[in-house]
Image (cartoon, rainbow, N blue to C red):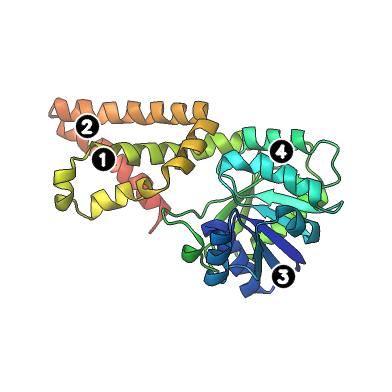
Amino acid sequence: MANHGVVAIIGPGLIGGSIGLGLRANGIAERTIGVTRSDASTKRALTAGVVDVATTDLGAACAEADLIVVCTPVSGVPAACQQAAAAARPGTVITDGGSTKKRLVEAVEQALDGSPVRFVGSHPLAGDHKSGPESARADLLAGRVVVVTPTRHTDADALEVVKRLWAGLGARVESMSPAEHDAALAKTSHAPHVIAAALAAATPEELLGLTGGGWRDTTRVAAGGAGLWRDILLDNPQATLQALEAFTEQLGRLQQAIADNDRDATYRHLEEGKLRRDALGS
C-alpha cells in the first residue's frame, strides 16, 4: 500500500482528524502534522491523538509535507490552499474535503495557476452532525464514498496520489466534474439539510418532549453547525434551489392527495418514497 510520507492536515477536526487516525491505523503515512488556528485547538488535536504533531504555523507544516489535505470550512479552502502552496515544495500535492466544488475548485486553480504545487479537489461523504477532533474515528471513511473532481487542469499523477489516499483509508472513490458534483450533492445533501433545518425550526419547543425516533432521524443533520452550512448553501445556491423546487413539487402533490382525501394517491406517494429509501438499504 502506498505510503504518503509526511501529510499535513489543515483543520484536524472531525474529517481531518479521522484522516489522521486512518493514516496511522493503515500505516500509510510516515508522520502527520495537524495545522490549527489556535493554541487551544492544537491542544485539542494532540489530546485526541488525531495527529502526531500539531502547530499553528501553516507555512512550516506545509514546507515539510509531501501531501496536504485542507479540511477547513469551504469558505476558507481557497486561501488555505494558496498559503499552503506558497510554502510547499515543488511537486507537493494538495487536496481538500470541501462539500462544494465548482466555485472552490475554480478559485483554487486560479490562485495556483503557474504554481509547481498540484491540486485535486475532493469531497469525502462521511460527515456527521458532531464536530471536532474528539469525534474523529480511524474508520470514518471505511466503506464511504469520496468524490474527486478533476478538471482539464488536473495533473494525472496528482490525481492518482489523491485516489490512493482515499482508497487507502477504505473509501470508494468516484470521479466527476465539479459542476456534476454540486448538482448531485444539492439533491442528496444540501437540500436535505435545508429541509431538516426547516422541519426542526417549525416544531414548537414545547412539543419537543413528544418527538419520537422519526422526528429525531429526520432532523439529525439540522444539528450541524449553522455557520458551516451557511457557507455550503451560499456556495452552491442555484443547484440547491433547483433541488428544493423538485422537493416542493413532490410535497405539493402529496399535500393535494391528503387534501382531496384521495387514499390511492396518498398511498402511491408514500410508497414511492418508501421504495426509494428501501433501495438504499439499512
- Distance between mark 2 and mark 1 Cα atoms: 9 Å
Residue at the spot 55% in from the left edge and 57% down from the top edge: 15
Circle 1 SS class? helix
In the picture, measured across the screen, residue 43 lies left or right of residue 53, that is: left
* Residue 29 visible, this angle: no
- Distance between mark 2 and mark 3 Cα atoms: 59 Å
The C terminus lies in quadrant: bottom left
Work out whether mark 2 precedes mark 1 in sequence or the reverse, and give the earlier one. Answer: 2
- Is 188 rendered above or below residue 250? below
- Is 263 rendered above or below residue 213? above
Any mark on residue 31, and which?
Answer: 3
- Neighbours of disc 3 within 10 Å: few (<14), some (14-19), many (20+): some
- Distance between mark 3 and mark 4 Cα atoms: 26 Å
Circle 4 SS class? helix
- Neighbours of disc 1 within 10 Å: few (<14), some (14-19), many (20+): few
Any mark on residue 261, and which?
Answer: none
Any mark on residue 270, and which?
Answer: 1
Circle 2 SS class? helix
Q: Where does residue 115 sit, x and y in percent of width and height?
A: 84, 41
- Distance between mark 3 and mark 1 Cα atoms: 51 Å
Query: In front: 278, or 122?
Result: 122
